[in-house]
Amino acid sequence: MALGEFRLKVNYFYSLTPREFVNTERGIRKHEEILSQERWIMTRKIMWATAFPHLKRVTEHDLQPFPWDEIEFEGMSVEESKRLQTEAEKVKEFYRKQDEIKKSQSI
């Protein structure tokens, strides 16, 4: 997989730690996913441009929706929003204290 599909050099492959290899794999897969999405979007644009004269009021997204077009957002209540905000503040405070402890130990 690494030498064939990812086209890594042998020396480079053997110099990677398992963590570095996993990060490399994730990066390559993400890049391939982005390229695939771009190709699908171009295909949809061509399809829409071809069909546009024969259709009325149809957008590209209506003609061929993709899962990555829109991120679904579920509205949350005000109480839930406040709870998440206070939880985030607690986490920030915790890490601020951790940073202070590290600074005092390093001096």
Image (cartoon, helix red, strand yellow):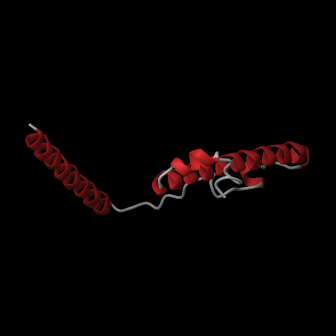
Corner quadrant of residue 11: top right
**Left or right: 77 with respect to 27?**
left
Residue 22 % position (x, y): 52, 56
Using the image as rendered, state which of residue 21 and residue 93 is in the foreground.
21
Quadrant placement of the N terminus: bottom right
Can residue 57 be spotted in the picture?
no
Q: Residue at point 38% right, 61% down?
A: 76
**Left or right: 83 with respect to 67?**
left
Residue 35 % position (x, y): 69, 46
**Left or right: 45 with respect to 32?**
right
Residue 33 % position (x, y): 65, 51
Q: Residue at point 78% right, 49% down?
A: 58
Q: How many marks?
A: 0
Can you say whether 1 is above or below 98 in the image?
below
Residue 59 % position (x, y): 75, 47
Using the image as rendered, state which of residue 49 and residue 37 is in the foreground.
37
Can residue 36 be spotted in the picture?
yes
Q: Residue at point 11% right, 46% down?
A: 101
Quadrant placement of the C terminus: top left
Q: Residue at point 57% right, 53% down?
A: 25
- As drawn, which residue projects farthest toward the top? 107
**Left or right: 67 with respect to 14?**
right
